Amino acid sequence: MTTHYTAPRVSGLCWFLAIGLAIAGASCAPRAVTLGQTQIGQGKLYQSGSVTYDRFFQDTHAVQLEVMRADDDEAAARAPLEKALDARGATLDKLYELAVTHARKGGEDVPPMVYVTVSGLEPNKEPPKDVKEPGENGDAPKEGTKEGAKEGPHDAKEGPKKIVVAVIPLDTLPAEQKAFVKALTETARSEAEILERFGPTMTKAAQLSTLSDELSDGVDREFSGRKARKDVTQELGAAKLILAATEDRAREVSTRARAFLKGLSEALKPPTPEAAPPPAPAAPEKPAATKPARPRRGGGGKPAKGAGAETSPPTRTDAPPAPASKPKPKPAEDFNP
């Protein structure tokens, strides 16, 4: 299992302020941003009065709160396994090592006391790029669109995959090991839930960061008052810093969870059933020997039935009919004058 950096458990708000201030101090942006003087920097929801901008601030606040709870969520997920292994405060990497060692008490040559399978870890595949435009494949253009005008891009990606974790104990599992198996199951499934949440959060934060640049370019057109333009600009700058920290934090959390689950599924993999040998090919059947039919004496008669018997050609039914025979002339009677 690859070791990843584990951030110390600190307050989510303090973590964001520290990261944001560090970014702002090193930034070369023309407008300095002081996070502590902004609503977003204090973890609050900012509203500007513009529907477009307020939707952005609401989404930013949502992902911000999601990541601020990451420390508590990770601690709650690890708690059952920490208790079972008597490893309070251990990192997720350390818990993985202890869990695998405990499950393989008998050594590498002995099957572990529990197997773990995880499905849904692989990312979704990209949609096919060779999608034909309407009309190319005979479809009529949709109503309300001009002929030849291309439609906007469709979001053909599938939703996030459901991660399914199965922990399978052996039938001969000792009674004193049931608590360990239960704790391993709870922690593994909680880590799967964390991965399902923080993977999309990372993507959402990156999308909002790009949107913040577009909104910054339109502040002067959207807001007429000087103070409103100044406040919105400050909040957008703070949102940019917060979203960058949010994306990094969500990536750390989801990467740890993915590595933990993948490591368990590889180290405690169920044995693959041995493939049964293919059945032997059946021997080819020998054709039954047949004796040729003997012709009857005298050459007459029909040939005997069976193999080798010749069959007479079928009588043609489409042959022209034989011409009718002319009546013979009657003998001339004696002339009697």
Image (cartoon, grey):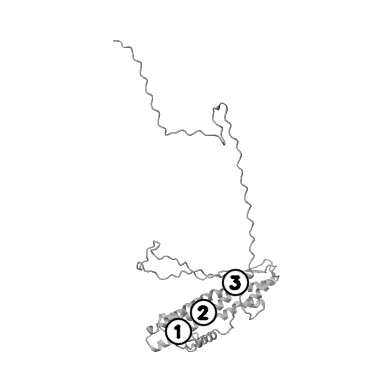
> What SS does tag 2 mark?
helix
Mark 1: few/some/many CA within 10 Å (<14, 14-19, 20+): many
Task: Locate residue 174: give its quadrant.
Answer: bottom right
- The foreground one among 299 and 3 is 299
Mark 3 — residue? 262
Q: Amino acid at mark 1?
A: Leu
Q: Is residue 322 above or below residue 6?
A: above
On the rendered image, what quadrant is the N terminus found in?
bottom right
Q: Residue furthest right?
A: 106
Q: Is residue 26 above or below residue 149?
A: below
Residue 247's tag is 2
- In space, the residues marked 2 and 1 are separated at their CA atoms by 16 Å
On the rendered image, what quadrant is the C terminus found in?
top left
> What SS does tag 3 mark?
helix
> What SS does tag 1 mark?
helix
Tag 2 and tag 1, C-beta contact below 8 Å: no
Residue 236's tag is 1
